[in-house]
Image (cartoon, rainbow, N blue to C red):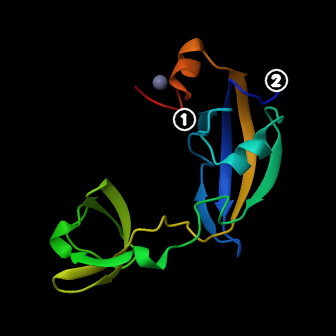
Amino acid sequence: MKIEDKKVVQFHYTLKDADQNLLESTEGDTPVAYLHGYQNMMASLEDALSGKAAGDKFSVTLTPEEGYGERNEEATQRVPIKHLQGAKKWKPGMVATVQTEQGQRQVTVVKVGKFMVTVDSNHPFAGKTLNFDIEVVDVRDASDEEVAHGHAHGVGGHQH
Ligand code: ZN
């Protein structure tokens, strides 16, 4: 069965940056599941998966624009340390949750002072070239319910 619209696809991936540093991998973990053709995946990645079948292995490289966008240097700001949620003690590189007018946001801690912390609200992979090694694990027809919801259910997909 080939990957096309209204198929639920399960795949493993290993993601590396331009210098081949490992960023993320699902190997040894649950594969990702998504509903093809419903913009649940970065468009370039979905294009690369299109027409593939279970057992296929391939690599695809995404530019920063195709991935998480370019870094926005204005997205770095100083906030009171008491506004950070997720840990008691903060160190550079840690990921914190902050409450903003747009709701909760994940930020990366850049610098820690006594009362103020410098945080970066760019996505951790913003500005990075993304090298994906992909292995398609399973391709199946989506259920009517999945098509109605616009996402995959079950292992690796949406849990209700
Ligand atoms: Zn659903």
Q: Quick check: can you spot residue 153?
A: no
Query: Mark 1, residues whose alpha carbon is within 10 Å: few (<14), some, or many (≥20)?
Result: some
| Residue at the image position 53 percent from the left and 32 percent from the top | 157
Identify the residue position indicated by label 2 in the image: 1
Q: Residue furthest top?
A: 144
| Residue 97: x %, y % from top left | 30, 60
Q: Quick check: can you spot residue 22?
A: yes
What type is the residue that disc 2 sits on? Met
The verdict on label 1 being within 8 Å of ligand 1 is no
Identify the residue position indicated by label 1 in the image: 156
| Residue at the image position 37 percent from the left and 60 percent from the top | 106
Q: Which mark is residue 73?
A: none
Label 2 sits on a secondary structure element that is loop
Residue situated in front as seen by the camera: 36 or 30: 36
From the viewer's perspective, is residue 81 above or below residue 7?
A: below
| Residue at the image position 62 percent from the left and 33 percent from the top | 38
- Real-space CA distance between mark 1 and mark 2, rounded to the nearest whole angstrom: 19 Å
Horizontal side of residue 58 vs 87, given as left or right: right
| Residue 109: x %, y % from top left | 35, 75
| Residue 145: x %, y % from top left | 53, 15
From the viewer's perspective, is residue 22 above or below residue 48?
A: below
Q: Residue furthest bottom?
A: 113
From the viewer's perspective, is residue 9 above or below residue 145?
A: below
Q: Quadrant where the N terminus lies?
A: top right
Label 1 sits on a secondary structure element that is loop
Query: Mark 2, residues whose alpha carbon is within 10 Å: few (<14), some, or many (≥20)?
Result: few
* Quarter of the figure with residue 10: top right
* Quarter of the figure with residue 135: top right
Question: Earlier along the polypeptide chain: callout 1 or callout 2?
Answer: 2
* Quarter of the figure with residue 74: bottom left
